[in-house]
Amino acid sequence: MTINAPPQVSSIEDVHPDWDSYASMFELLEAAGAGYVKVIPASANHEARGKAPAGKAWQESPFSADQVKSHFRRGGNVGLLCGHNRLIVIDADAKTPQTTAAAVLTAWPALAGTLTIVRATAPERAKFVIRIIDGDPLPASKSYDGLDILAAKRQAVIAGTHAGDAAKGVS
């Protein structure tokens, strides 16, 4: 498979957020032992651009934040390897009124204290990163209508540009 490089621009910030804008998120995740996935750039000629992992065996070979930094600076997205060191993601896609970020927070108020990732153009959607307590079993990955539990062998895009949309940010 051939992946098109991002367009040439005077500064990567013209098409992609700055790595430093994610520094606090990566510091928190690094402290929690996060593993990362290189994700195909949103500008690539690929049907799952901006969301699909780049490369093979990504579930078994997570990258560190330092290792994904150059990929990100070239326009690639970064995913969190779910299940790694017991970190999972609850992804509220707002496909129904019950699966908006606000509705999920109402149903599970403890999520208000978690790392939350949103897109500026889709504030009704959010990814909540949580750690499963040692000794508790990891949940299975499940998809509901607009709510995904992303656990072992899954990834969630946490930094970069959504295809045809705005950059993700942290709240």
Image: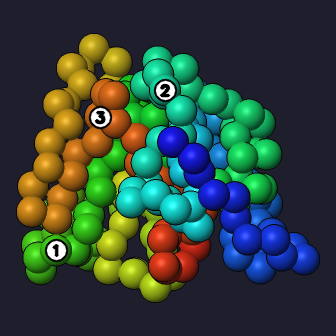
On the image, which quarter does residue 22 sit in? bottom right
The amino acid type of the residue labelled 1 equals: Lys
The percent position of residue 133, horizontal first and vertical second, equals: 33, 26
Q: Earlier in the sequence, mark 2 or mark 1?
A: 2
Which one is in front, 56 or 128? 56
Residue 158 visible from this viewpoint:
yes
Which mark, by number, is residue 56? 2
Q: Position of residue 20 (x, y in %)?
A: 79, 60
Cα separation, mark 2 vs mark 3, equals 19 Å
Amino acid type, callout 3: Ala
Q: Is residue 97 left or right of residue 21?
A: left
Q: Position of residue 10 (x, y in %)?
A: 90, 77
Q: Which numbered disc, 2 or 3, marks the residue closer to the eye?
A: 2
Q: Could you tell me which residue is drawn at 48 percent across and 71 percent down?
A: 163
Label for residue 151? 3
Give the distance between the C-alpha atoms of the residues marked 2 and 1, in whole angstroms: 30 Å
User: Tell me, what colour scheme is on the image?
Assistant: rainbow
Q: CA distance from mark 1 to mark 3?
A: 20 Å
Residue 166 lies left or right of residue 14; in this view the side is left
Q: In the rendered image of this protein, does residue 9 appear above or below residue 35?
A: below
Q: Give the number of the disc on residue 95.
A: 1
Q: Nearer the viewer, mark 2 or mark 1?
A: 2
Name the residue located 39 percent from the left edge and 81 percent from the top edge: 122
Q: Nearer the viewer, residue 37 or 133?
A: 37
Q: Residue at x 23, y 20 (%)?
A: 136
| Local crowd size for mark 1, using a 10 Å CA cut-off: few (<14), some (14–19), many (≥20) | some
Residue furthest toward the right? Answer: 10
Is the Cβ of the residue at disc 1 closer than 8 Å to that at disc 3?
A: no
> Residue 38 has which mark?
none
